[in-house]
Image: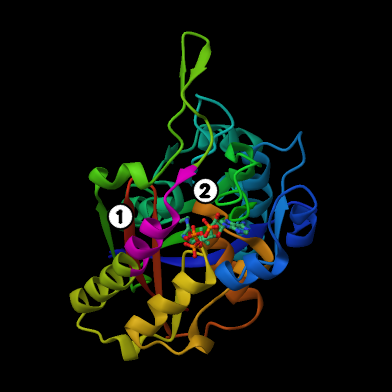
Amino acid sequence: MMRYSRIIGTGGYLPEKIVTNDDLSKTLDTSDEWIQTRTGIRQRHIAAPEQETSDLALIASQRALANAGLAASDIDLIVVATTTPDMVFPSTACILQDKLGIHNSGAAFDVQAVCSGFMFALATADRMVASGMAKNALVVGAETMTRILDWNDRGTCILFGDGAGALVLQASETPGILSTHLHSEGRQRHILNAPGQVRDGRIYGTPFIHMDGGAVFRFAVQVLAESTQEALAHNGLQPSDIDWLVPHQANARIMDATAKKLGVPPERVINTVAGQANTSAASIPLAMDHGVRHGCFKSGQLLALAAVGGGFAWGASLVRWG
Ligand code: UT7
Protein backbone atom coordinates (compact mmCIF):
# COMPACT_ATOMS: atom_id res chain seq x y z
CA MET A 1 0.00 0.00 0.00
CA MET A 2 1.56 3.31 -1.14
CA ARG A 3 0.65 5.82 1.55
CA TYR A 4 3.57 8.19 1.26
CA SER A 5 5.76 10.04 -1.18
CA ARG A 6 9.52 10.27 -1.07
CA ILE A 7 12.11 12.40 -2.82
CA ILE A 8 14.03 10.38 -5.41
CA GLY A 9 15.85 13.16 -7.28
CA THR A 10 16.83 16.82 -7.15
CA GLY A 11 18.04 19.34 -9.70
CA GLY A 12 18.83 23.02 -9.83
CA TYR A 13 19.67 25.72 -12.34
CA LEU A 14 21.11 29.20 -11.89
CA PRO A 15 21.43 31.51 -14.90
CA GLU A 16 24.97 32.19 -16.10
CA LYS A 17 24.99 35.96 -15.51
CA ILE A 18 26.24 36.92 -12.04
CA VAL A 19 25.85 40.39 -10.52
CA THR A 20 27.98 41.02 -7.42
CA ASN A 21 27.33 43.52 -4.65
CA ASP A 22 30.23 45.59 -6.02
CA ASP A 23 28.50 45.64 -9.41
CA LEU A 24 25.35 47.01 -7.75
CA SER A 25 27.28 49.66 -5.84
CA LYS A 26 28.34 51.21 -9.16
CA THR A 27 24.78 52.39 -9.85
CA LEU A 28 23.23 52.33 -6.38
CA ASP A 29 24.05 54.01 -3.05
CA THR A 30 25.08 50.76 -1.35
CA SER A 31 28.18 48.71 -0.62
CA ASP A 32 29.33 45.11 -0.52
CA GLU A 33 30.03 45.56 3.19
CA TRP A 34 26.45 46.80 3.95
CA ILE A 35 24.79 44.05 1.96
CA GLN A 36 26.95 41.25 3.35
CA THR A 37 26.60 42.41 6.95
CA ARG A 38 22.81 42.78 6.79
CA THR A 39 21.95 39.82 4.55
CA GLY A 40 24.92 37.50 3.99
CA ILE A 41 24.40 37.96 0.22
CA ARG A 42 27.49 38.34 -2.00
CA GLN A 43 26.03 37.90 -5.48
CA ARG A 44 22.90 36.93 -7.42
CA HIS A 45 22.24 35.23 -10.78
CA ILE A 46 20.13 37.03 -13.37
CA ALA A 47 18.23 35.37 -16.21
CA ALA A 48 19.14 36.36 -19.78
CA PRO A 49 16.45 38.46 -21.49
CA GLU A 50 15.34 35.54 -23.65
CA GLN A 51 15.09 33.12 -20.69
CA GLU A 52 11.59 32.68 -19.32
CA THR A 53 10.82 31.23 -15.89
CA SER A 54 9.81 27.98 -17.64
CA ASP A 55 13.25 27.79 -19.28
CA LEU A 56 14.93 27.86 -15.87
CA ALA A 57 12.38 25.29 -14.64
CA LEU A 58 13.11 23.09 -17.65
CA ILE A 59 16.84 22.75 -16.94
CA ALA A 60 16.26 22.17 -13.20
CA SER A 61 13.61 19.54 -14.04
CA GLN A 62 15.82 17.74 -16.56
CA ARG A 63 18.59 17.58 -13.96
CA ALA A 64 16.18 16.29 -11.30
CA LEU A 65 14.88 13.62 -13.69
CA ALA A 66 18.45 12.53 -14.53
CA ASN A 67 19.27 12.42 -10.80
CA ALA A 68 16.15 10.30 -10.18
CA GLY A 69 16.88 8.02 -13.13
CA LEU A 70 13.47 8.71 -14.66
CA ALA A 71 12.39 9.81 -18.13
CA ALA A 72 10.11 12.81 -18.60
CA SER A 73 7.42 10.40 -19.80
CA ASP A 74 7.37 8.81 -16.30
CA ILE A 75 6.02 12.06 -14.82
CA ASP A 76 2.26 12.22 -14.31
CA LEU A 77 2.05 15.38 -12.19
CA ILE A 78 3.82 18.76 -12.40
CA VAL A 79 3.36 21.42 -9.74
CA VAL A 80 5.27 24.66 -10.25
CA ALA A 81 5.56 27.26 -7.50
CA THR A 82 6.18 30.69 -9.00
CA THR A 83 5.37 34.36 -8.45
CA THR A 84 6.90 35.30 -11.79
CA PRO A 85 5.09 33.13 -14.35
CA ASP A 86 5.95 33.38 -18.05
CA MET A 87 2.57 35.01 -18.72
CA VAL A 88 -0.88 35.58 -17.21
CA PHE A 89 -1.92 32.17 -18.54
CA PRO A 90 -1.43 29.32 -19.31
CA SER A 91 0.37 28.21 -16.16
CA THR A 92 4.14 27.92 -16.20
CA ALA A 93 3.61 24.24 -15.32
CA CYS A 94 1.71 23.67 -18.59
CA ILE A 95 4.46 25.42 -20.55
CA LEU A 96 7.07 23.32 -18.73
CA GLN A 97 5.10 20.15 -19.46
CA ASP A 98 5.22 20.93 -23.17
CA LYS A 99 8.92 21.88 -23.09
CA LEU A 100 9.65 18.54 -21.37
CA GLY A 101 7.77 16.77 -24.17
CA ILE A 102 5.17 15.27 -21.83
CA HIS A 103 1.81 14.76 -23.54
CA ASN A 104 -1.46 13.11 -22.51
CA SER A 105 -0.15 12.32 -19.06
CA GLY A 106 -1.53 13.76 -15.86
CA ALA A 107 -1.99 17.27 -14.49
CA ALA A 108 0.23 20.35 -14.55
CA PHE A 109 -0.59 23.51 -12.61
CA ASP A 110 0.99 26.40 -10.70
CA VAL A 111 0.69 27.42 -7.08
CA GLN A 112 1.42 30.94 -5.90
CA ALA A 113 2.56 31.63 -2.36
CA VAL A 114 5.59 33.79 -3.18
CA CYS A 115 8.71 32.76 -1.19
CA SER A 116 6.80 30.00 0.62
CA GLY A 117 5.35 28.67 -2.65
CA PHE A 118 7.54 25.60 -2.70
CA MET A 119 6.09 24.38 0.61
CA PHE A 120 2.58 24.70 -0.81
CA ALA A 121 3.62 22.90 -4.01
CA LEU A 122 5.33 20.14 -2.02
CA ALA A 123 2.32 19.61 0.26
CA THR A 124 -0.04 19.45 -2.74
CA ALA A 125 2.12 17.03 -4.73
CA ASP A 126 2.88 14.91 -1.65
CA ARG A 127 -0.81 14.43 -0.85
CA MET A 128 -1.68 13.71 -4.50
CA VAL A 129 1.06 11.09 -4.76
CA ALA A 130 0.30 9.58 -1.34
CA SER A 131 -3.40 9.25 -2.21
CA GLY A 132 -2.68 7.49 -5.50
CA MET A 133 -3.66 10.38 -7.81
CA ALA A 134 -0.14 10.38 -9.29
CA LYS A 135 2.91 8.10 -9.21
CA ASN A 136 5.82 10.36 -10.10
CA ALA A 137 5.58 14.10 -9.53
CA LEU A 138 7.87 16.95 -10.50
CA VAL A 139 7.72 19.68 -7.88
CA VAL A 140 9.40 22.84 -9.10
CA GLY A 141 10.18 26.27 -7.69
CA ALA A 142 11.14 28.67 -10.49
CA GLU A 143 11.47 32.43 -10.40
CA THR A 144 12.70 35.45 -12.31
CA MET A 145 12.22 37.78 -9.34
CA THR A 146 14.77 40.27 -10.66
CA ARG A 147 12.17 41.27 -13.28
CA ILE A 148 9.83 42.68 -10.65
CA LEU A 149 12.49 44.70 -8.80
CA ASP A 150 12.79 48.46 -8.77
CA TRP A 151 16.56 48.74 -9.32
CA ASN A 152 16.51 52.20 -7.69
CA ASP A 153 15.11 50.82 -4.41
CA ARG A 154 18.20 49.75 -2.48
CA GLY A 155 16.05 48.28 0.29
CA THR A 156 14.71 45.53 -2.00
CA CYS A 157 16.74 45.16 -5.21
CA ILE A 158 19.84 43.86 -3.41
CA LEU A 159 17.93 40.92 -1.95
CA PHE A 160 16.74 38.80 -4.88
CA GLY A 161 18.10 36.57 -7.63
CA ASP A 162 16.76 34.25 -10.35
CA GLY A 163 16.86 30.46 -10.44
CA ALA A 164 14.95 27.20 -10.37
CA GLY A 165 15.02 24.01 -8.36
CA ALA A 166 13.11 20.76 -8.81
CA LEU A 167 12.39 17.61 -6.82
CA VAL A 168 11.00 14.32 -8.10
CA LEU A 169 8.50 12.70 -5.71
CA GLN A 170 7.58 9.04 -6.03
CA ALA A 171 4.86 6.96 -4.38
CA SER A 172 6.32 4.92 -1.55
CA GLU A 173 5.33 2.47 1.18
CA THR A 174 7.52 4.31 3.66
CA PRO A 175 8.00 8.07 4.24
CA GLY A 176 9.44 10.24 2.66
CA ILE A 177 7.62 13.36 3.50
CA LEU A 178 6.41 12.94 7.10
CA SER A 179 4.04 15.92 7.06
CA THR A 180 3.73 19.51 5.86
CA HIS A 181 2.04 22.31 7.82
CA LEU A 182 0.85 25.40 5.95
CA HIS A 183 -0.47 28.76 7.14
CA SER A 184 -1.54 32.09 5.68
CA GLU A 185 -2.38 35.48 7.16
CA GLY A 186 -3.76 37.88 4.55
CA ARG A 187 -3.97 40.68 7.10
CA GLN A 188 -0.16 41.01 6.77
CA ARG A 189 -0.24 41.43 2.99
CA HIS A 190 0.82 45.10 3.16
CA ILE A 191 4.35 44.40 4.52
CA LEU A 192 5.50 42.55 1.38
CA ASN A 193 3.77 42.78 -1.99
CA ALA A 194 3.94 43.69 -5.68
CA PRO A 195 0.53 45.34 -5.99
CA GLY A 196 0.45 46.00 -9.75
CA GLN A 197 -2.48 44.70 -11.74
CA VAL A 198 -2.86 43.92 -15.46
CA ARG A 199 -6.26 45.32 -16.49
CA ASP A 200 -7.79 46.55 -19.72
CA GLY A 201 -4.44 46.16 -21.46
CA ARG A 202 -2.55 48.31 -18.94
CA ILE A 203 -0.66 47.90 -15.66
CA TYR A 204 -2.30 49.64 -12.71
CA GLY A 205 -0.37 50.20 -9.49
CA THR A 206 3.31 49.43 -9.06
CA PRO A 207 4.49 46.16 -10.56
CA PHE A 208 7.60 46.22 -8.35
CA ILE A 209 8.24 44.57 -4.99
CA HIS A 210 7.39 46.76 -2.03
CA MET A 211 8.59 45.72 1.44
CA ASP A 212 8.72 46.81 5.06
CA GLY A 213 12.03 45.03 5.71
CA GLY A 214 11.99 45.21 9.50
CA ALA A 215 8.42 43.89 9.80
CA VAL A 216 9.17 41.07 7.35
CA PHE A 217 12.28 40.16 9.29
CA ARG A 218 10.44 39.88 12.63
CA PHE A 219 7.50 37.98 11.16
CA ALA A 220 9.79 35.56 9.28
CA VAL A 221 11.89 34.56 12.28
CA GLN A 222 8.80 33.95 14.41
CA VAL A 223 6.83 31.80 11.96
CA LEU A 224 9.76 29.79 10.56
CA ALA A 225 10.58 28.55 14.06
CA GLU A 226 6.90 28.14 15.04
CA SER A 227 5.92 26.08 12.00
CA THR A 228 9.01 23.88 12.34
CA GLN A 229 8.06 23.28 16.00
CA GLU A 230 4.52 22.47 14.89
CA ALA A 231 5.79 19.87 12.38
CA LEU A 232 8.08 18.32 15.00
CA ALA A 233 5.29 18.12 17.60
CA HIS A 234 2.93 16.54 15.05
CA ASN A 235 5.45 13.73 14.51
CA GLY A 236 6.45 13.33 18.17
CA LEU A 237 9.93 14.70 17.46
CA GLN A 238 12.20 17.30 19.09
CA PRO A 239 14.37 20.06 17.58
CA SER A 240 17.37 17.94 18.60
CA ASP A 241 16.14 15.26 16.15
CA ILE A 242 16.74 17.62 13.18
CA ASP A 243 19.82 16.56 11.21
CA TRP A 244 19.49 19.33 8.60
CA LEU A 245 17.52 22.55 8.60
CA VAL A 246 16.75 23.66 5.03
CA PRO A 247 15.19 27.10 5.41
CA HIS A 248 14.00 29.51 2.74
CA GLN A 249 17.16 31.36 1.71
CA ALA A 250 15.98 34.93 2.32
CA ASN A 251 18.74 36.28 4.39
CA ALA A 252 21.56 34.80 6.51
CA ARG A 253 20.40 36.71 9.61
CA ILE A 254 16.86 35.29 9.37
CA MET A 255 18.27 31.78 8.96
CA ASP A 256 20.71 32.24 11.87
CA ALA A 257 17.98 33.57 14.16
CA THR A 258 15.62 30.72 13.22
CA ALA A 259 18.29 28.07 13.79
CA LYS A 260 19.16 29.67 17.13
CA LYS A 261 15.49 29.65 18.23
CA LEU A 262 15.29 25.95 17.38
CA GLY A 263 18.71 25.13 18.85
CA VAL A 264 20.02 23.78 15.52
CA PRO A 265 23.80 24.37 15.21
CA PRO A 266 24.91 26.51 12.22
CA GLU A 267 26.80 23.62 10.59
CA ARG A 268 23.45 21.76 10.32
CA VAL A 269 21.82 24.56 8.31
CA ILE A 270 21.95 24.51 4.50
CA ASN A 271 22.97 28.04 3.51
CA THR A 272 23.26 29.04 -0.14
CA VAL A 273 22.25 32.68 0.19
CA ALA A 274 25.74 34.15 -0.32
CA GLY A 275 25.99 32.90 -3.89
CA GLN A 276 22.33 32.97 -4.95
CA ALA A 277 20.52 35.67 -2.89
CA ASN A 278 16.78 35.13 -2.34
CA THR A 279 15.35 33.14 -5.24
CA SER A 280 11.85 33.09 -3.70
CA ALA A 281 10.03 29.80 -4.41
CA ALA A 282 13.19 28.32 -5.95
CA SER A 283 15.30 28.67 -2.84
CA ILE A 284 14.29 25.49 -0.97
CA PRO A 285 14.65 23.06 -3.92
CA LEU A 286 17.94 24.78 -4.85
CA ALA A 287 19.11 24.36 -1.25
CA MET A 288 18.00 20.71 -1.29
CA ASP A 289 19.92 20.14 -4.52
CA HIS A 290 22.97 21.86 -2.99
CA GLY A 291 22.74 19.51 0.00
CA VAL A 292 22.50 16.46 -2.26
CA ARG A 293 25.38 17.50 -4.50
CA HIS A 294 27.60 18.19 -1.48
CA GLY A 295 26.79 14.79 0.06
CA CYS A 296 25.22 16.35 3.16
CA PHE A 297 22.13 14.16 3.52
CA LYS A 298 22.55 10.56 4.72
CA SER A 299 19.92 7.84 4.59
CA GLY A 300 17.59 7.99 7.59
CA GLN A 301 18.41 11.59 8.46
CA LEU A 302 15.65 14.05 9.36
CA LEU A 303 15.40 17.22 7.24
CA ALA A 304 13.27 20.18 8.32
CA LEU A 305 12.19 22.47 5.46
CA ALA A 306 10.61 25.83 6.32
CA ALA A 307 9.66 28.86 4.25
CA VAL A 308 7.84 32.16 4.59
CA GLY A 309 6.82 34.84 2.12
CA GLY A 310 4.35 37.45 0.99
CA GLY A 311 0.71 36.87 1.69
CA PHE A 312 1.76 36.31 4.37
CA ALA A 313 2.13 32.60 3.83
CA TRP A 314 4.41 30.08 5.51
CA GLY A 315 4.92 26.42 6.24
CA ALA A 316 7.26 23.65 7.31
CA SER A 317 7.78 20.07 6.24
CA LEU A 318 9.70 17.16 7.74
CA VAL A 319 11.45 14.72 5.42
CA ARG A 320 13.02 11.36 6.25
CA TRP A 321 15.89 11.14 3.75
CA GLY A 322 16.84 8.11 1.68
O1 UT7 B 1 11.33 36.32 1.58
C1 UT7 B 1 11.32 37.45 2.40
C2 UT7 B 1 12.06 38.57 1.70
N1 UT7 B 1 12.44 39.66 2.53
C3 UT7 B 1 13.47 39.67 3.38
O2 UT7 B 1 14.16 38.72 3.58
C4 UT7 B 1 13.77 40.98 4.04
C5 UT7 B 1 13.88 40.91 5.53
N2 UT7 B 1 14.46 42.16 6.01
C6 UT7 B 1 15.78 42.38 6.01
O3 UT7 B 1 16.55 41.50 5.68
C7 UT7 B 1 16.26 43.71 6.46
O4 UT7 B 1 15.18 44.46 6.98
C8 UT7 B 1 16.95 44.50 5.31
C9 UT7 B 1 18.28 43.83 4.95
C10 UT7 B 1 16.05 44.60 4.09
C11 UT7 B 1 17.25 45.91 5.80
O5 UT7 B 1 18.05 45.87 6.96
P1 UT7 B 1 17.64 46.76 8.21
O6 UT7 B 1 18.67 46.53 9.23
O7 UT7 B 1 16.21 46.43 8.57
O8 UT7 B 1 17.79 48.21 7.63
P2 UT7 B 1 16.72 49.38 7.57
O9 UT7 B 1 15.68 49.09 6.54
O10 UT7 B 1 16.26 49.69 8.97
O11 UT7 B 1 17.60 50.57 7.06
C12 UT7 B 1 18.71 51.06 7.81
C13 UT7 B 1 19.45 52.07 6.95
C14 UT7 B 1 18.52 53.10 6.30
O12 UT7 B 1 19.21 54.34 6.26
P3 UT7 B 1 18.89 55.49 7.34
O13 UT7 B 1 17.42 55.78 7.14
O14 UT7 B 1 19.18 54.86 8.67
O15 UT7 B 1 19.80 56.57 6.92
C15 UT7 B 1 18.35 52.61 4.90
O16 UT7 B 1 18.06 53.64 3.98
O17 UT7 B 1 20.08 51.40 5.85
C16 UT7 B 1 19.72 52.03 4.63
N3 UT7 B 1 19.73 51.04 3.57
C17 UT7 B 1 20.82 50.76 2.85
N4 UT7 B 1 22.07 51.23 2.90
C18 UT7 B 1 22.96 50.73 2.03
C19 UT7 B 1 18.70 50.26 3.12
N5 UT7 B 1 19.12 49.48 2.12
C20 UT7 B 1 20.44 49.76 1.93
C21 UT7 B 1 21.41 49.29 1.05
N6 UT7 B 1 22.66 49.79 1.13
N7 UT7 B 1 21.15 48.33 0.13
Q: Which residue is mark 2?
A: 75
The circle drawn on residue 162 is: none
As helix, strand or loop, the secondary structure at mark 1 comes to helix
Q: Main secondary structure of the magenta part?
A: helix
Task: Tell me how far mark 1 sits from mark 2, CA to CA.
Answer: 16 Å
Give, as a single range, the part of the protein colored magenta.
210-221
Taking depth in this image into account, of 125 and 283 the one nearest to the observer is: 283
For image coordinates 57% across by 67% down, the residue present is 39
Rendered-image quadrant of the N terminus: bottom left
Q: Which residue is depicted at the point 46% across and 27% down?
A: 196
Q: Residue 127 got which mark? A: 1
- Residue at 71 percent of width and 66 percent of height: 32
* Circle 1: residue type: Arg
Q: Position of residue 273 (x, y in %)?
A: 60, 67
| In the image: residue 139, left or right of residue 144 | left
For the question of whether residue 240 can be seen, the reply is yes
